[in-house]
Image (spheres, grey):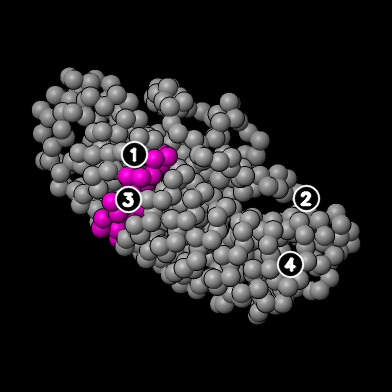
Amino acid sequence: MKNILILIFVALFLLQGCYIPNSNNSESQLVDKNYEENINEERENKGSTKVKISSTEKTIQEKYNSIQDRLILPSFKSQLSWHTDGDKTGRHHYMKPSSYDMMPNENIAHKSIEEALKNPLEVVYLFLSNQKMRKLPKEIVQLQNVERIEFMEESFQDLSNDFELLAQLPKLKYLGFNGCDLRSFPSTISKLRNLEVLTFHRSNLPSLPNEICNLENLLDLYLYNNRTFSKLPDSIGKLKNLEVLGVAGTSLKTFPESIGDCDRLLHITANACKLEKLPNSFGNLKNLFFINFGYNKIKELPETFGNLKRLRIAWLGHNKLKSLPENFSKLDNLITCSLTGNKFTEFPMQLLELKNLLGITLNENQFNYIPLEVAEMKYVDQILFDSVDIRQSNLDSIAVLNPNIRLWKQ
């Protein structure tokens, strides 16, 4: 039963971008594994729209469709590609960005500088892996039509001059360093003014220079699995067009106060970090649709959290929350909420006022009663809990009042 519930939440509510550590894996290994599996899935299933769903999932999907038109959309038109996960209407839900749509056919990637320079103006995607590069050759400036460059398992001595060269590529929008050994990062990154996507996956990156915040066209910033990374630039609020921020698997403890100025942020993945708190400015992120803050050390949410009017998915499991701010009840766009593995000794009553909530996970907490008012929640389809102290009579009463709610006991 537990596996069925997890499948429903993953498949329906588009939590494929969430990584759930367990006792058999380190946090960094799981972030790595999920990142790579998602990439492979995107590559293998490119163009596929076939999605198998169970009858239970179909019922929940119908409920979701019934509230879809009431949910508030972003205040702007996103410039990114997003997964529709088989939705034939082409509707996306701002839950899972698809950076690979920028280059729909990976077969066009050139795999070496030598190969690329044979016909430099035909190169749009350059993928360099294990080339034992210490620096880029000057000839790379001949790739005037290249849009995407990825480095895999390379060790650069000093990127300062390399960025001077890359800045001469007018169409370069995507730059990735994955599995690279980057012990320092130069301020010359600010010269790449046209960058829209910047990724650092498992690259030993300790910090980012403030100059990165001058990349006014940046839409995606990924820093997955850099365990030494502990602080975002104080001036990150200057990234006015930033839509996606991924810092999963880092040592980040909080966000700079200026994060609230990134008012186009739609998607934040920051699980398996060391987050202890969120700044008050977090509530200014009026377009935020998705957060994954699972497996951190957050003890309380700021009072401004209830200002996130467009928030649809809140993954807050495995923190140290004992209560929710009062205005959490104002999150009318919220459709699923995970509070698994926190410190609640009472059912969080703010959930009862959430008008469009479909699913709640509350297992691994310490409360012993589910209020009967749960039965009055119009769209809630399922609640996961596991407290042995909750009496069967309590569950039976809810089932009588609303037989459509599935109470999943772990």
Label 2, label 3: how far apart the Cα atoms are: 47 Å
Nearer-N-terminus badge (4/1): 4
Query: Closer to the camera: disc 4 or disc 2?
Result: 4
Tell me which amino acid carries mark 1.
Leu
- Residue carrying label 4: 167
- Residue carrying label 1: 331
Tell me which amino acid carries mark 4.
Ala
Nearer-N-terminus badge (2/3): 2
Residue at the image position 58 percent from the left and 67 percent from the top? 212
| 229 inside magenta stretch | no
- Residue carrying label 2: 108
Residue at the image position 31 percent from the left and 62 percent from the top? 276
Residue 128: quarter of image: bottom right
Circle number at residue 304: 3
Query: Closer to the camera: disc 3 or disc 4?
Result: 3
Residue at the image position 54 percent from the left and 61 percent from the top? 238
Instruction: Say few, some or many: other residues with alpha carbon within 10 Å of mark 3 (under 14 / 14 to 19 / 20 or more).
Output: some
Instruction: Say few, some or many: other residues with alpha carbon within 10 Å of mark 1 (under 14 / 14 to 19 / 20 or more).
Output: many
